[in-house]
Amino acid sequence: MPEQFKAGAQQAVGNLFAQYAEFLVEGYYFRSGPPNLGTVHFLVMPVPPALVDGTIVQPNDERLLFDAVELAAVDQPRPDDYILQASNGLRRDIITAHLDVTGTYWAMVARKVL
């Protein structure tokens, strides 16, 4: 991707997270092995129905969006990682994780563990 487009994409993602700052959820990112990999902030939304295949992605899974800068300390987010929500201890297991083509945000599918 040309650098001039990447700068614009980074600004747009920054604006998105700034616009929805009141809806950001704070949590702690974990991977089996090392302890807490850091505090992160993310947006939570339903998974679009077209992405629910019933096998990997199930009904009631959630889509999480992270600014890539927030996950700089995490080497390749992946399944079996998990996030503990700071406000109530809710655990979300990561099912899938994808960095967008511009490298500015991570989109993940997570499953609540009750």
Image (cartoon, rainbow, N blue to C red):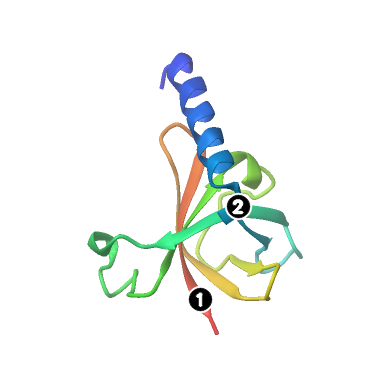
Left or right side of 59 for 45: right
- Please report the residue visible at 30 percent of the width from the left and 60 percent of the height from the top: 48
- Please report the residue visible at 42 percent of the width from the left and 17 percent of the height from the top: 2
Residue 109 in the image: x percent, y percent? 43, 62
- Badge 2 is on which residue? 22
| Mark 2 / mark 1, whichever is N-terminal | 2
> The residue tagged with tag 2: helix, strand or loop?
helix
- Please report the residue visible at 68 percent of the width from the left and 76 percent of the height from the top: 89
Q: Amino acid at mark 1?
A: Lys
Q: Amino acid at mark 2?
A: Glu
**Residue closest to the far right:** 35
- Badge 1 is on which residue? 112
Q: Which label sits in the foreground, 2 or 1?
A: 2
On screen, residue 56 above or below 73 = below
Crowd rating for badge 1 (residues with CA inside 10 Å; few <14, some 14–19, many 20+): some
Left or right side of 8 for 31: right
Residue 20 in the image: x percent, y percent? 54, 47
- Please report the residue visible at 54 percent of the width from the left and 68 percent of the height from the top: 80
The quadrant where residue 53 appears: bottom left
Residue 3 image label: none
Q: In the image shown, does 112 or 79 lie closer to the viewer?
A: 112
